[in-house]
Image: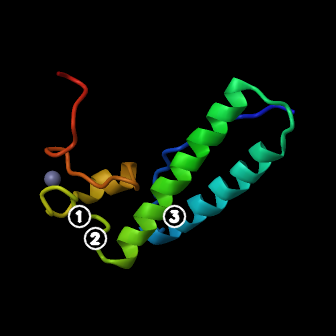
């Protein structure tokens, strides 16, 4: 069996609500995690894939919670609305461009 990492960033199509996209993504991640956990061969790549999938699933769950408390689409730092273009490209975004930390130090 070949384990293939699934895409962790998914763009939202124009006719699909963010919530629907997130719920669909949650189903995909749960299925992938179930599949990865069924493989009996222990290996570092498999374990890393499972860990990565669990983190992605947790991110999706947090985004769905933000949908429930209406904070979805709002920067968690400055509380301004995120540009729709950000959410289209990065449906899990929780910060605006100004508040997103950079790697530069
Ligand atoms: Zn911000």
Q: Are marks 1 and 3 in contact (CB under 8 Å)?
A: no
- Nearest to N terminus: mark 1 or mark 3: 3
| Helix, strand or loop under label 2 | loop
Residue positioned 22% across, 42% down in the render: 100
Looking at the image, is 35 positioned above or below residue 20?
above
Q: Is 47 placed left or right of 78 in the picture?
A: right
Give the alpha-carbon distance from disc 1 to disc 2, as whole Å.
5 Å
Residue positioned 60% across, 40% down in the render: 51
Position of residue 54 measured from the top left corner of the image (x, y, whole percent): 58, 48
Callout 2 environment at 10 Å: few (<14), some (14 to 19), or many (20+)? some
Query: What is the quadrant of the N terminus in the image?
Result: top right
Q: Are marks 1 and 2 in contact (CB under 8 Å)?
A: yes
Residue positioned 21% across, 37% down in the render: 101
Give the mark toward the camera: 3 or 2: 2
Name the disc covering residue 71, or none.
2
Q: How is the image coloured?
A: rainbow
| Helix, strand or loop under label 1 | loop
Residue positioned 50% across, 63% down in the render: 22
Q: Are marks 3 and 2 in contact (CB under 8 Å)?
A: no
Name the disc covering residue 74, or none.
1
Give the alpha-carbon distance from disc 1 to disc 3, as whole Å.
17 Å
Relative to the observer, which residue lies in front, 59 or 25? 59
Callout 3 environment at 10 Å: few (<14), some (14 to 19), or many (20+)? some
Q: Is 38 placed left or right of 7 in the picture?
A: right
Name the disc covering residue 21, or none.
3
């Amino acid at each position: 069996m070949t384990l293939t990492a699934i895409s962790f960033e998914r763009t939202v199509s124009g006719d699909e609500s963010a919530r629907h996209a997130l719920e669909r993504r949650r189903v995909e991640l749960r299925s992938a995690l179930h599949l990865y956990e069924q493989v009996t061969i222990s290996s570092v790549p498999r374990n890393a894939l499972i860990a990565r999938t669990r983190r992605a699933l947790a991110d999706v769950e947090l985004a769905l919670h933000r949908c429930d408390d209406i904070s979805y689409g709002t920067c968690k730092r400055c509380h301004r609305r995120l540009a729709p273009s950000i959410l289209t490209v990065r449906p899990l975004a929780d910060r605006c461009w100004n508040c997103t930390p950079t790697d530069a130090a």
